[in-house]
Image: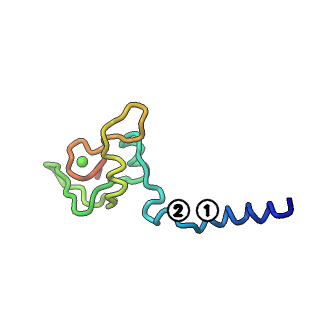
Amino acid sequence: MHIRPLLVGTAVTAILFGSVAPPAEAVGAKSYRNCNALNKVYAHGVGKQGAVDKTSGKKVTNFKISTKIYNLNNGPHKAGGREYDLDRDNDGIACEKR
Ligand SMILES: [Ca+2]
């Protein structure tokens, strides 16, 4: 029983510093239920690198650029799932907003 705290400590260390730790950009990358929720975190939306807003008005250019986050929010809406189609006009930017 004396060895137990050591094992727990090793496990915690492995979780904190192990290879399973996500890269910095993946932290906070997730799917949002709708644009209200996404815009609370990314006020101007999230788009792929090089995406151009398809609006006929003034284009949104200050969206967060992250293909990873964009992909997490450009899925088909699945009932009970975690993927939502938040890029309805398919211009490569989800929830673009000025
Ligand atoms: Ca869009």
How many discs mark residues in the rendered view? 2
Point out residue 90 in the picture as x, y percentages from the top left corner. Answer: 21, 46
Which residue, given by chain and number where applicable, does mark 2 sit on? 20
Which residue, given by chain and number where applicable, does mark 1 sit on? 15
Marks 1 and 2 in Cβ contact (< 8 Å): yes
Quarter of image, res 60: bottom left
Locate the N terminus by quadrant.
bottom right
Judging depth in this view, the residue of 45 and 30 nearest the camera is 30
Quarter of image, res 18: bottom right
Residue 23: mark in rendering: none
Q: What is the spatial separation of the Cα atoms under label 1 and label 2, in whole angstroms?
A: 7 Å
Relative to residue 13, is residue 30 depicted above or below? above
| 85 left or right of 2 in image | left
| 22 left or right of 70 in image | right
Q: Which mark sits nearer the N-terminus, 1 or 2?
A: 1
Judging depth in this view, the residue of 51 and 63 nearest the camera is 51
| 25 left or right of 97 in image | right
